């Protein structure tokens, strides 16, 4: 069941909070998933941001934070540096997660997503380490009454579901991004969504074209121009029991507002409310 249509704040590349609000309004939307990084860094102030959002009718459906040291230049580099996998950055990333949870709490946000990184094979010490780290971060956000969701893409849906079936992962949700499945070459997003739907708490609306060269990045494209089957996508999420937000994400291209507006028009075709 679709609750609302929103847009990722970072997709609009705002120069400042006022610029973000203007861009959201230009897209014809009133909700955003906000990047928490600029609040953690101190570049943006939570109180001032709320004071700008409220009279503008802008509400925050969720937040997202990025981990330290990620290198997205190649699939191999992000596999080595993504999320909470690097041992030498774990303490710093745990501290970052704590600061992101504080910022989210101050903003009144109750759902935050992040990329945990590639999940190692089950039965290995590295796998147990990642599970333990996700649990620690989950506990950090839970102490502020905030739900944590893992972004899809770095692994196949079957591997993600196996990890979420761990006894201490029962409260962790999924932010499903169909384009990431294509970009990382991790399987059919339609089948992945069907498999994961009971754990999905939010979805990103993003499109992509797969790479013809194994081991290389696919290409992100405006929604409707790629390989995501939007008929199947919306048919599936309309059947999800819990109401979830569809958050439009665009991380490439020079016409972000225009691309987001195009995505909004697609959601209109499926009877989604803004």
Image (spheres, grey):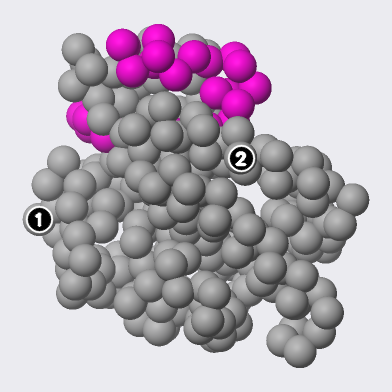
Q: Is residue 10 visible?
A: no
- Categorize mark 1 by other alpha carbons within 10 Å: few (<14), some (14-19), many (20+): few
Q: Residue at x 55, y 82 (%)?
A: 166
Q: Is residue 64 visible?
A: yes
Left or right: 90 as drawn, with respect to 248:
right
Which residue, given by chain and number where applicable, does mark 1 sit on? Answer: 271
Q: Secondary structure at mark 2?
A: helix
Which residue, given by chain and number where applicable, does mark 2 sit on? Answer: 98
Left or right: 227 as drawn, with respect to 140:
left
Q: Position of residue 56 (x, y in %)?
A: 21, 15
User: Which is nearer the N-term, disc 2 or disc 1?
Assistant: 2
Q: Position of residue 121 (x, y in %)?
A: 75, 84
Residue 193 vertical position relative to residue 136 in the rendered view, above or below: below
Query: 1 or 191, which lies in front?
Result: 1
Q: Position of residue 259 (x, y in %)?
A: 38, 38
Q: Position of residue 177 (x, y in %)?
A: 46, 60
- The answer to which quarter of the image holds residue 181 is bottom right
Q: Residue at x 49, y 14 (%)?
A: 45
């Amino acid at each position: 069941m679709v609750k609302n249509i929103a847009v990722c704040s970072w997709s609009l590349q705002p120069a400042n909070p006022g610029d973000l609000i203007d861009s959201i309004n230009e897209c014809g939307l009133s909700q955003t998933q906000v990047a928490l990084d600029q609040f953690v860094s101190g570049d943006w102030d939570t109180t001032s941001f709320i004071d700008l959002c409220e009279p503008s009718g802008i509400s925050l459906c969720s937040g997202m934070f990025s981990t330290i040291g990620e290198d997205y230049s190649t699939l191999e580099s992000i596999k080595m540096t993504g999320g909470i996998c690097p041992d030498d950055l774990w303490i710093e990333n745990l501290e970052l997660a704590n600061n992101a949870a504080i910022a989210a709490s101050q903003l009144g946000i109750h759902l935050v997503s992040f990329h945990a990184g590639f999940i190692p094979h089950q039965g290995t010490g590295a796998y147990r380490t990642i599970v333990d780290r996700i649990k620690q971060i989950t506990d950090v956000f839970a102490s502020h009454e905030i739900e944590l969701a893992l972004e899809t893409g770095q692994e196949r849906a079957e591997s993600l579901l196996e990890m979420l079936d761990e006894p201490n992962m029962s409260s962790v949700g999924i932010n499903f991004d169909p384009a990431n499945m294509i970009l990382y070459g991790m399987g059919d997003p339609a089948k992945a969504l069907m498999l994961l739907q009971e754990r999905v708490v939010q979805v990103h609306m993003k499109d992509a074209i797969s790479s013809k060269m194994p081991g290389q990045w696919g290409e992100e494209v405006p929604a409707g121009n790629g390989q995501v089957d939007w008929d199947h996508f919306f048919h599936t999420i309309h059947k999800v029991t819990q109401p979830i937000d569809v958050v439009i994400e665009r991380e490439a291209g020079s016409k972000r507002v225009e691309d987001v507006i195009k995505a909004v028009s697609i959601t209109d075709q499926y009877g989604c409310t803004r």
